[in-house]
Image (spheres, rainbow, N blue to C red):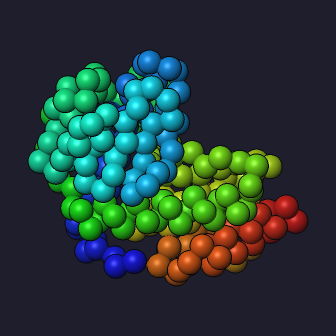
Amino acid sequence: MTVPSPSVLSETRRGLHGVAELVLAGPQYRRTGTIRLRPGRHGFGTITEPELRVEGGRLVAGERRLDLDGATPAGLGAAAGVEAGAPADLYHGGSGVRLDDVLRIDESAAAYLADCFAAGDAALRALAPAETPVLWPEHFDLSITVDQVNFGVSPGDEWLDEPYAYVGPRRLRPGPFWNAPFGAARPLRELAGPDVLTTFLREGRDLAARS
């Protein structure tokens, strides 16, 4: 995967996070009571009604394919037939994107982030085949929880401004493996390939179980 420049990646990530939260998760929550999203082909989408998904730099709503770059969440929601807005009273924080913010989405950066989520999805399913990875709109990370340990992939955030994999036990463990305030993390560029990524997650699982 070709890594986009940090500024382009950060701007695109913020925009996609805003779409995930305001255009997909919020309307889905108001209609069906769940904020869970799923990774998908070239992007991510809802798991129930309304049936919406992001593919690359576009929002797909039925037969309509709406360009994200230059659009606003409010405009995208209106064009897709939903009322845009975050899930109410569920969490603090989120994307920080407002309904009238103009989104800047780079196609190559969007494709790169979709590849990161796809690699994470494959690795998480290999780690725990009985679990279904969830893309959460609050932090825009893909994760599962097994035996009180969170395993996941983040596209980057305030802690590390690039995609990374993490292992986050609810009770922090001692030792050199645990290099983050929430547990352990490694940039995805250091974990090329689903087998290497799965190995990192398995190592975290085994160390968490032993300590």
- Write the residue at 18% across / 47% down: 67
Residue 6 left/right relative to 199 = left
- Write the residue at 26% across / 68% down: 108
- Write the residue at 74% across / 55% down: 129
Residue 70 percent across, percent down from the top left:
11, 47
Which quadrant is home to the N terminus? Answer: bottom left
Which quadrant is home to the C terminus? Answer: bottom right
Of 103 and 65, nearer the camera is 65
The residue sitting at the front extreme is: 63
Of 139 and 122, nearer the camera is 122
Q: Give residue 203's quadrant in the image.
A: bottom right
Q: Is residue 151 visible?
A: yes
The residue sitting at the right extreme is: 210
Of 66 and 143, nearer the camera is 66
Q: Is residue 168 visible?
A: no
Residue 59 left/right relative to 118 = left
Q: Relative to residue 9, is residue 75 depicted above or below?
A: above
Q: Relative to residue 185, is residue 15 depicted above or below?
A: above
Q: How many marks?
A: 0
Residue 204 percent across, percent down from the top left:
73, 67
Q: Relative to residue 164, is residue 78 depicted above or below?
A: above
Residue 139 percent across, percent down from the top left:
46, 47
Residue 199 left/right relative to 104 = right
Residue 194 percent across, percent down from the top left:
60, 73
Q: Give residue 126's quadrant in the image.
A: bottom right
- Write the residue at 48% across / 59% down: 117
Q: Give residue 4's quadrant in the image.
A: bottom left
